[in-house]
Image: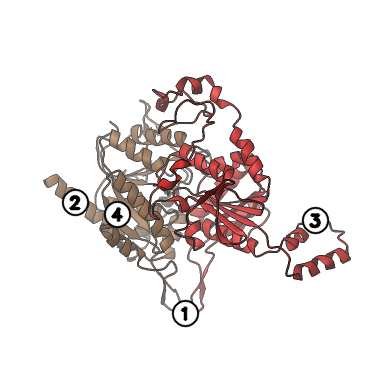
Amino acid sequence: SALSNVDNVVLVMSGKGGVGKSTVAVHLANALVAKGFKVGLLDVDLTGPSVPRLVGLTEHSVHKSADGGWIPVYADNTQRLAVMSIAFLLRSASDPVIWRGPKKNAVIRQFLNDVMWGDIDYLVVDTPPGTSDEHISTCEYLLEQSRKPVSLLVTTPQAIALSDVRKEAAFCRKLDLPIVGIVENMSGYVCEKCAECTNIFSSDGGRLLAEELGVPFAGRVPIDPRVSACEDAGRDFFATHPDATSLQCIVDVAQQLADSAKKDQQQ
Amino acid sequence: GINAEYGTHPPATSMSDSKLVAPPPEHCVGPNSETAGQASGCAGCPNQKICASGEAKAPDPDIAAIVERMSTVKHKILVLSGKGGVGKSTFSANLARALAARKVSADETANTNDSTVDKDDADAAAAADDDDDDELCQVGLLDVDICGPSAPTILGLEGQQVHFSNLGWEPVYAADNLAVMSVGFMLDGADSAVIWRGPKKNGLIKQFLRDVNWGTLDYLVVDTPPGTSDEHLSVVQYLKGAVDGAVIVTTPQEVALQDVRKEINFCRKVGVPVLGVVENMAGFVCPHCTHAQQIFVPSTGACCTVVRRYGCFSSW
């Protein structure tokens, strides 16, 4: 099957929109590549695909191979980061994708069955908010190919986000998906002038939720305007700001995934 | 999942109930779909022949019921975004509250486009405005984000439940003149997940429009999830496009704006006027030193450039 040489699948999920799923997915993928792994990055947010912009691939489109499979877009010449998104199939970035569930499911099936990911260590999947067609189908089609994904949840600290993330956790439990951690994004903002921290979106909610659910707390990502600026420009944050520590917890998650995969192999 | 109490009023699917002989299966594409009766999920379904024959694609009688229900709702406003987490629910709840604080006579005067309004009439309207007996606008807030309902939390209505009367589903009232409906009022617990595919979500949205006893409303504000999918199509289709317009919410950065462009094009495609675009999270003023700064940098000129390019009426 198309995914038979894909060793590990990580679903980056939330429940809540706009908490930083795409940010976490892209930087997790980049962190894994930096550790020497070959990574696929699949964007199943069909109506609001952000991944191509974040990795600086907005001018690219997808090509089919001789046998009809889709060739993913590679982020650079080393071909260690392969990317697939509906955005590569649109004529214009302003074209809306106005599809109901069944059509979305069909495309997601193609993304998982027909894309020639090749021999990769990790497939990181960026999902849209919610617990609907995209999520159900992605899990279903992965299980059809005997790929059991793990889930990395992203939240912001405030209650209105946590409420949705609990629902996503319930989804994961229902489908028996292990939750490898919860990342608390937009966790405080340090004023550029006086260096005081303001908890714009409240504080500590991610850690408390992790405790409540009995899952690992992956850490906090503070609000860093440089992250958004890099994303708009499609620049790699780690390469542009090598001394920045804002996204350290995502690097840590990459290390944990690597360690646990190694352990599984040894066993 | 959904509270067992609502078992007696199970969320309908998007089916026209009259033609089908069995409940639809999990992956039903719907009898009005182009692949009705022919999709892979149709195999083995008792309705398969009926759907394939096109019999079930009859005019939906529920539409007439919705038109009837909505006939007492003067203005319907959708709050959309392409991007998640930009503040649709925040904006919707606060718009609903702001509208509910307005007096009806102020709105009637404001809506007058006649530039020859008599000065005496204007004075009379202004005097009426001061009259304490003047009615406040009747407002409804409909939350069609089925998977991530935020309205109950934002309006301080968590834990409230929907009740049924002979007039239909009774909305929950945030104030005497502010009625709210959300799936959030129908869950077994606040954290219960609603893990539904499109057809089932569409069915509940239809019930929100057909069965909720909104009464007479001056404004119905509809809060939506991000994107351009089932929920958005269904609301527009069930309302037969009789929507005054949509307000699109965004944040300043390009990653959000690229979704705004899609949303504007969605509105054009389905015939919903764009009333304007709201730019949320536009700058931060430090509460400690009052220094103003940008968190979500408007690298491509923020929503003003989008508004100019697309000729939208207003940007706020």
Q: Which mark is residue B288?
A: 1
In space, the residues marked 2 and 1 are separated at their CA atoms by 43 Å
Q: Is residue A175 visible?
A: yes
Query: Tag 2: residue type?
Result: Ser
Q: Which chain is red?
A: B
Query: Quadrant of the rendered structure where residue A20 is?
Result: bottom left
Residue holding disc 2? A260
Where disc 4 sits, the SS reads: helix
The amino acid pointed to by label 4 is: Ala
Q: Which mark lies nearer to you, 3 or 1?
A: 3
Which chain can be seen in brown? Answer: A
Which amino acid type corresponds to the residue marked 3 in the rendered image? Asn
Residue at 68 percent of width and 64 percent of height: B102
Residue B64 in the image: state x and y as whole percent: 64, 36
- Residue, disc 4: A31
Tag 4 or tag 2, which sits nearer the N-term? Answer: 4
Comparing marks 1 and 4, which lies closer to the viewer? Answer: 1
| Left or right for B56, reference A8 | right
Q: Which three-letter amino acid code belongs to the residue tagged 1?
A: His
Q: Chain of mark 2?
A: A
Q: Residue tagged by mark 3?
A: B113
Q: Nearer the viewer, residue B20 or A170?
A: B20
Taking depth in this image into account, of A244 and B82 the one nearest to the observer is B82
